């Protein structure tokens, strides 16, 4: 079986690694991939025609990031008869339009923060009066994680709203929720949602969850992160999404990644993403007992009813090593040293890496996702931090407190 994975980050390296575990998978090509992924071929992930070209002769295509989903790559591939894992453009709107997602949750009774979609400064002002003064202002489109501003005052909210209305047609203003966040992943085939795993991301650059928001500085997934009852309930939310999308004529297939805020009044949905999370995927694939290719094939063929994903007991963890300065400006092209010192039980998934004269060099903000599984979180963290001690590049930064909430320190 030949598989094409679209994307070039740590998530895609992890997906390629997991696909190659299967004896049935004879070849994996990754586009554009990176220096850590054998079989990488250059492509612009927003170039639908180029991706369709690479998909010729492939038995399965797996889409990693949101950009090609928003560009309609799944629709284009399906029109050519290619088997593809990921949602069509209309279903990816659960991620690409926050306004759509919020209205959808309203129509299907899914608990979320109170909100208004605003198209003018006056509307933002009215929304702040209704929910504020603490509100969250969100750009209504893909903004690579940078379109969300947490505002503590009316003035901050108005300034954020006006700035975003300059670049986007509308903004969503919503009530601020408090509590720990959980990411829940479910695999969907248009009719059925099957739970994959719960995970916790660490979005801030600084230890103790301080500083700027990033794409994610580390994640873990472990037994007991949420109770078995809560997992069933969270899968139920995913099933409600699948039922609603089907009823509305835009069936959802692919991974539904629901961000929950565990508030005092119960879990509420913060957002949907219509793809695997990064770096959650790097932590989750290491825990899979069921082969990834079996899961993806069941979804693509509409065979998820009665399907169950088996995970290894214990914990999986990923800690991201990033370029100094990220998520702001940073320099690239620094040699990555010590990759050959990494021992067994640890996988180093590459994200922003490239080659220069046979040497692996930094090429992005998030450079590596160092990942391991253990019988518990402490063991997995020990393996990862042990490996990180031997890896270096100029300006390398990583958080030393991944999993701190679960471990009850800090
Ligand atoms: P989103 O892209 O909508 O998930 O927002 C990014 C991050 O902003 C979330 O992971 C939360 O940390 C935070 N956030 C979003 N919406 C809210 C909210 N209503 N209340 C508190 N924090 C939020
Ligand atoms: N880790 C968050 C995301 O993939 O959006």
Image (cartoon, helix red, strand yellow):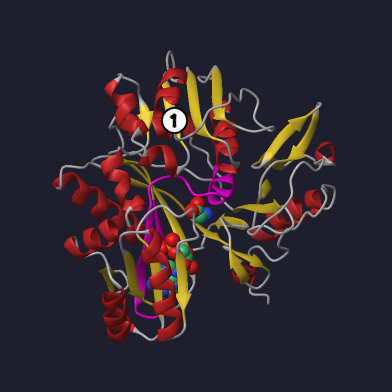
Relative horizontal placement of residue 285, taking residue 374 as reference (left or right): left
Q: Is residue 137 visible?
A: yes
Which residue shows up at 83% across the image and 53% down it? 389
**Badge 1, how many Cα within 10 Å: few under 14, some, many 20+?**
some
The number of numbered discs placed on residues in the rendered structure image is 1
Q: Is residue 261 visible?
A: no
Task: Reply above or below: 171 against 57.
Answer: below
Which residue occupies the extreme top position in the image?
57
Q: Is residue 277 magenta?
A: yes
Q: Which residues are magenta?
A: 257-286
Relative horizontal placement of residue 62, taking residue 78 as reference (left or right): right
Element carrying mark 1: loop
Q: Is residue 283 magenta?
A: yes
Residue 87 location (% of width, % of height) = 33, 39
Which residue shows up at 41% across the image and 35% down it? 295
Which residue shows up at 51% across the image and 45% down it? 311
Instruction: Tell me the quarter of the image containing the C terminus.
Output: bottom right
Which residue occupies the extreme front position in the image?
166
Residue 284 location (% of width, % of height) = 54, 47
**Which picture quadrant has residue 329?**
bottom right
Disc 1 Cβ-to-ligand 2 distance below 8 Å? no
Residue 165 location (% of width, % of height) = 36, 65
Task: Reply above or below: 183 against 254.
Answer: below
**Which picture quadrant has residue 364?**
top right
Question: Badge 1 is on which residue?
Answer: 47
Foreground residue among 149 and 223: 149
């Amino acid at each position: 079986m030949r598989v094409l994975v679209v994307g070039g980050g740590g998530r895609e390296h992890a997906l390629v690694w997991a696909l190659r575990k299967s004896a049935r998978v004879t070849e994996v090509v990754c586009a554009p991939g990176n220096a850590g992924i054998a079989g990488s071929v250059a492509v612009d992930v927003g170039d639908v025609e180029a991706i369709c070209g690479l998909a010729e002769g492939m038995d399965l295509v797996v889409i990693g990031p949101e950009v090609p989903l928003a560009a309609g790559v799944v629709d284009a591939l399906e029109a050519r008869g290619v088997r593809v894992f990921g949602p069509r453009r209309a279903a990816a709107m659960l991620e690409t339009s926050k306004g759509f997602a919020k209205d959808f949750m309203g129509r299907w009774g899914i608990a979320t923060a109170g909100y208004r979609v605003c198209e003018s400064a006056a509307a933002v002002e009215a929304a702040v009066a209704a929910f504020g003064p603490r509100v969250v202002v969100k750009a209504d489109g893909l903004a690579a994680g940078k379109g969300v501003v947490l505002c503590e005052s009316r003035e901050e909210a108005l300034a954020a709203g006006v700035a975003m209305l300059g670049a986007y047609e509308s903004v969503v203003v919503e009530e601020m929720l408090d509590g720990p966040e959980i990411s829940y992943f479910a695999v969907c085939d248009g009719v059925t949602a099957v739970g994959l795993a719960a995970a916790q991301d660490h979005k801030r650059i600084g230890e103790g969850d301080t500083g700027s928001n990033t794409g994610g500085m580390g994640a873990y997934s472990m037994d007991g992160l949420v109770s078995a009852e809560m997992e069933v309930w969270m899968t139920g939310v995913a099933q409600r999404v699948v039922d609603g999308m089907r009823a509305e004529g835009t069936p959802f297939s692919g991974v539904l990644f629901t961000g929950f805020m565990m508030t005092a009044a119960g879990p509420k949905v913060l957002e949907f993403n219509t793809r695997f999370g990064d770096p959650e995927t790097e932590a989750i694939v290491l825990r899979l007992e069921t082969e990834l290719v079996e899961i993806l094939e069941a979804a693509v063929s509409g065979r998820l009813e009665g399907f169950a994903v088996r995970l290894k007991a214990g914990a999986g963890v990923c800690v991201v090593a990033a370029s100094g300065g990220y998520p702001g400006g940073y320099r690239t092209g620094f040699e990555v040293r010590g990759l050959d010192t990494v021992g067994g039980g640890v996988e180093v998934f590459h994200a922003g890496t490239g080659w220069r004269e046979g040497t692996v060099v930094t090429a992005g903000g998030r450079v590596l996702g160092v990942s391991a599984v253990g019988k518990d979180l402490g063991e997995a963290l020990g393996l990862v931090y042990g490996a990180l001690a031997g890896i270096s590049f100029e300006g390398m930064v990583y958080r030393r407190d991944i999993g701190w909430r679960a471990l009850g320190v800090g």
